[in-house]
Image: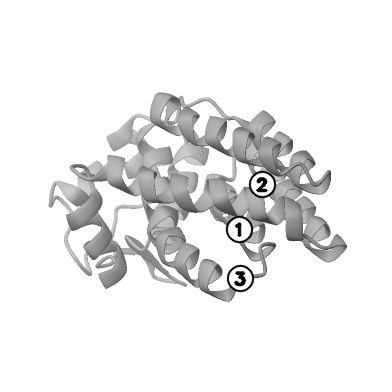
Amino acid sequence: MGLIQSGKYKKDEKLPPEPELMKLLSVGRSTVREAVKILVHAGFLEVRQGDGTYVKTPSVGFQTVQSTLIPQNFKQVLEVRRMLEIEAAGLAALRRTEDDIQVMRSRLDLRNEYLDKGRYAEYVAADISFHMAVVEACHNDVFSAMYKVIADGLRELLSQLILDTRGYEDNTIYHEAIYMAIKAGDSEGAKRYTAQNLDAVTLGKRL
């Protein structure tokens, strides 16, 4: 990520082969491959089958998010996320259906599986997908549309964070608590655990 941002590799320039990247970054093959997957997911790289990996201009959406939110307004992003996710959790506990519960459970299971396997690109996507499922359980189309806007930015932002902070602590325990509270119809509990999860983001770069 730093090599791209520094301008060492420019748009449409082909990255060196894996062995050279391993030597350049002083990391193993699996780390290089996972980093490439995350950067592809975030829109920074493009894999051209049979040719190689090339630097790609980030999407307009991410450029907008990056210029307006990173790093000077990161606190504001978290404030908006906090307002949306806490209220969504409370409403979801009151309005969720059995189908909603099943969707949340399946997405949370995927999140946990990808984390255990170190598949961080898929982990970020599954984490956002779980929170989107919570919002969708509110059964409010306007609410869902609003969260999707912030989620699109968060997906790329969190991809960058996980690259820069591999030592961050996971907080799966809060996600499980959010799910259980919603399943039990505990609106206040769902809001409380969501707030604790978001507080952890500011303290430990967690998702």
Q: Which residue is drawn at 23% across and 55% down?
A: 66
> Residues under labels 1 and 2: Cα distance?
9 Å
Where's residue 189, x and y in %? Answer: 69, 35
Structural crowding at the residue carrying mark 3, measured as other residues with C-alpha within 10 Å and reported as few (<14), some (14–19) or many (≥20): some
Q: Can residue 36 be seen from the camera position used here?
A: no
Q: Which residue is drawn at 18% across and 49% down?
A: 5
Sequence-earlier tag: 1 or 2: 2
In this view, the residue farthest toward the right is 98
CB-based contact (under 8 Å), mark 1 and mark 2:
yes
The amino acid at mark 2 is Arg
Any mark on residue 111, and which? 2
Q: Can residue 111 be seen from the camera position used here?
A: yes
Any mark on residue 140, and which? 3
Any mark on residue 129, and which? 1
The amino acid at mark 3 is Asn
In the structure shown, which secondary structural element does the residue marked by tag 1 occupy? helix
